[in-house]
Amino acid sequence: MSTQSFDKVIRGGRVVTPRGTAETDIGIRDGQIAVLGSGLSATAEVIDASGLLVLPGGVDAHCHIDQMVSSGARTADDFEGASVAAAFGGTTTLISFAAQHRGQSLRHVVEEYKTRAQGKSVLDYGFHLIVTDASQQTLDVDLPALVNEGFTSVKIYLTYDALRLDDRAALDVLTAVRREGAMPLIHAESHDMIAWFTEKLLASGYDQIRHLADARPRLAERDAVHHAVSLAELVNIPIVLVHMSSAEAVEQVRWARRRGFPIYAETCPQYLVLTREALDRPSFEAAKFCCSPPLRDRASQDALWSALNDGTLSILSSDHSAFVMEGPDGKLRDGPDTAFNRVQYGMPGLELRLPLIFSEGVGTGRLSIERFVEVTATEPARLYGLAGRKGVIAPGADADLVIWDPKKQIRITPEALHDGLGWTPYEGRHVTGMPVMTMARGTVVCREGERLAAGGHGRLLARARPEACAINTPPATGFDVVSGQFICDAPAS
């Protein structure tokens, strides 16, 4: 029996650690995991987890919270509401976005988002930087300073008129990101293909919401993923390809991996449990299922599950982007018969990300419990500069812990959720396996349906430069930002 004393001890649960699953106690002191062992004593509280799982809190590394999007609409939740919903779903760390729009100062944008979140979140949080204005001020002044402050990931878009970068601007951003040792994220869909398809469909009278999947085809995703890989290869930088939705996109990731290129890829619950048939509904209902990329067919769904299991897909995030249905910020803000290209894209997912994938993955044998933890917690923490602090149960890590009842069943309804949105695309589904307690840095945030932590418990995270971005070798061709020299293809012999 240990003679050490702890603030809290979690006792009797099956604990998932980097080395596997075992029954062990967890001693918590000063908000961190102090030790794993048996017979631990606590001066304050013993939490009985007998018969339950103890998992590291989820790291949701792709969520849009209190964000004005390119259409001018604002997402429905603030950092308090979003973090509470996430905690009830077993997530303990959020990485949202500080979204620069054209002409804005990146520094000013980050300061504004810090103000929006301060004193509200019950969970620790960080920001990816969205760069849409690749000016000298952004890339040579603001970006280096912000990376040094712990904002060590940058997202760019290859589509959307108000967000996308052309190839030259994208290469400038990727070069600056590589120079600073940060991680780039890329939204990869072919802008011109989508614009062409959309124009033809609308001109022919095919404007119903169900044609969203036709306007943004799998081919447009495949093409853009390949293009994104080529841009990254030219600069020699690893990338994260976000929200993979199709078998064709997955094959491009495999192609890049076979060539030894460091590509990481993400998918989301909607692509694993929903299909494009959900769009074949009246407009008000169909709008709930509009996201970008759109929902695909069952063949792509099966391919994604396989890729998530075999490591082709590295992480699972929510891409949470919650909107009310009507009004100036609504999904149908242009009216109930809005054309597919005028619907506000995005789905809520913070609270249901982990329960859905636990039920449909671990519960069906598609994923082991260890792989579930890896893709939802450990690997996103590693990729985004939080390795050893978040997403893992090990001495020295933050005591971000979730106790799961693998047998608890619920039927999903809007009333059963904590986001206050009033709708969910998963309404009526049953899930098996739910969190019964969520702890953030040793503080119990929620337990058995009751919220216990106040807004402001969460802290803004200063993230390290990801180890995956510590590249010292020059690119095969192009401009080497390390040596400052151009490297050209060898002449043909």
Image (spheres, grey):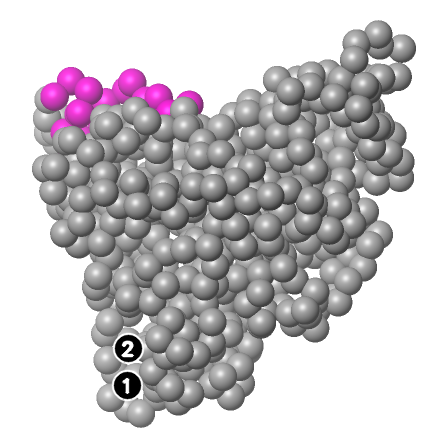
Residue type, label 2: Thr
Residue 172: mark: none
Q: Residue at x 21, y 61 (%)?
A: 162
Numbered range of the magenta stretch: 465-484
Q: In this view, does 407 lie to the left or right of 463?
A: right
Image location of residue 449, percent across then percent down: 74, 53
Q: Split into 4 quadrants, where in the image is the C terminus? A: top left
Residue 34 visible here: yes
Q: Along the line of sight, which residue is nearer the eye, 467 or 97?
A: 97
- Name the residue beneath numbered marker 2: 198
Separation (CA) of disc 2 from disc 1? 6 Å
Image location of residue 213, percent across then percent down: 42, 74
Local crowd size for mark 2, using a 10 Å CA cut-off: few (<14), some (14–19), many (≥20): many
Residue found farthest to the bottom? 205
Q: Is residue 56 magenta?
A: no
Q: Is residue 361 left or right of residue 486?
A: right
Q: In the structure shown, which secondary structural element does the residue marked by tag 1 occupy?
A: helix
Residue 358 visible here: no
Q: Along the line of sight, which residue is nearer the eye, 74 or 166?
A: 74
Q: In the structure shown, which secondary structural element does the residue marked by tag 2 occupy?
A: helix
Marks 2 and 1 close (CB-CB < 8 Å): yes
Q: Does the magenta stretch include residue 473?
A: yes
Residue 170 figure quarter: top left
Image location of residue 202, percent across then percent down: 28, 85
Residue type, label 1: Leu
Image location of residue 52, percent across then percent down: 84, 40
Residue 311 figure quarter: top right
Local crowd size for mark 1, using a 10 Å CA cut-off: few (<14), some (14–19), many (≥20): some
Note whether 492 is above or below 249 in the view shown: above
Residue 202: mark: 1
Residue 31 figure quarter: top right
Note whether 93 is above or below 329 in the view shown: above
